[in-house]
């Protein structure tokens, strides 16, 4: 049965085994970032012959416990999730990014999570050209977008954020507070 699983996963385009083998040959733990519309999940995984072992895990929905009032599927929350992962992964000094089947898109949420992990003290090889700018990581682009809307549009577009007690034009302040809370809490 184990021989059929790789063929099925390859056929269903769920696993690129050539890419996976290359990553495993490095001997380094893998950073796995998976994203959905409302969440970013991050894991540091180490391979062993009995199966993969998750060394550390964090997801954006956990940020609410640190005071995050913004959306959990955007660049600032992905950065904070990567940062939280790095703070939890005390024994991990370096890892390598495993994109899986995600497209390699520069300045994406995946690279925001990578930057968060790097800033927490874990070495991950990534070129500066793929990392989102500091302004995007802090959510300044979201603040600027919100500032161009009339109050009714803003209430409709950012209703969850406003319901959580956060003015979308002050997202970067909430970002800084959550970053501070992660440093104090982990």
Image: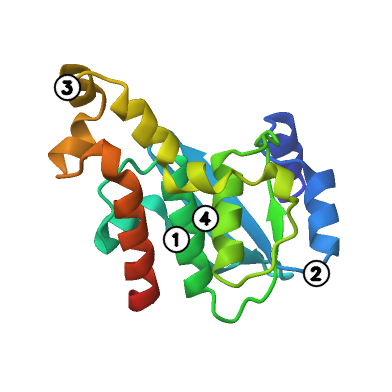
| Residues at circles 4 and 1 in contact by the CB criterion of under 8 Å | yes
- Point out the tag, 4 or 1, that comes first from the N-terminus: 4
- Whole-Å distance between the Cαs marked 3 and 1? 35 Å
Q: For the residues marked 3 and 4, what is the alpha-carbon distance in whole angstroms?
A: 35 Å
Q: Residue at x 85, y 63 (%)?
A: 25
Report helix, strand or loop for mark 2: loop
Whether 15 is drawn above or below 150: the answer is below
Q: Local crowd at mark 3 within 10 Å, few (<14), some, or many (≥20)?
A: few
Q: Which residue is mark 2?
A: 27
Binning the other alpha carbons within 10 Å of mark 2 as few (below 14), some (14 to 19) or many (20 upward) gives few
Contact? badges 4 and 2 (CB < 8 Å): no
Vertical comparison of 114 with 45: above or below: above
Q: Secondary structure at mark 3?
A: helix
Seen at 60% across and 55% down, the residue is: 114
| Residue with the mark numbered 1 | 58
Mark 2 vs 3, N-terminal side: 2
- Label 1: which secondary element: strand
Disc 4 designates what residue? 42
| Disc on res. 151 | 3
Q: Label 1: few (<14), some or many (≥20) within 10 Å?
A: many
Residue at screen point 26% across, 23% down: 157
**Which of the two labelled residues, at mark 3 and mark 4, occupies the earlier sequence position?**
4
Q: Nearer the viewer, mark 2 or mark 3?
A: 3
Label 4 element class = strand
Front residue of 56 and 167:
167
Callout 2–callout 3 Cβ contact below 8 Å: no
Q: Nearer the viewer, mark 3 or mark 4?
A: 3
Q: Position of residue 130 (x, y in %)?
A: 69, 43
């Amino acid at each position: 049965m184990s021989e059929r699983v790789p063929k099925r996963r390859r056929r269903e385009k769920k696993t690129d085994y050539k890419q996976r083998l290359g990553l495993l040959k490095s001997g380094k733990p893998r950073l796995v970032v998976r994203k959905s519309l409302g969440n970013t999940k991050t894991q540091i995984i180490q391979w062993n012959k009995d199966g993969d072992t998750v060394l550390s895990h964090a997801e954006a929905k956990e940020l609410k416990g640190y005071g995050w009032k913004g959306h959990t599927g955007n660049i600032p929350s992905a950065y904070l999730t990567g940062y939280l992962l790095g703070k939890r992964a005390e024994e991990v000094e370096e890892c390598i990014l495993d994109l899986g089947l995600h497209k390699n898109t520069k300045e994406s949420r995946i690279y925001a999570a990578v930057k968060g992990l790097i800033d927490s003290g874990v070495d991950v090889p990534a070129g500066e050209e793929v990392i989102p700018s500091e302004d995007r990581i802090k959510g300044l682009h979201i603040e600027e977008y919100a500032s161009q809307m009339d109050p009714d549009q803003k209430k409709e577009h950012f209703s969850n954020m406003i319901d959580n007690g956060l003015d979308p034009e002050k997202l970067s302040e909430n970002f800084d507070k959550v970053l501070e809370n992660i440093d104090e809490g982990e």
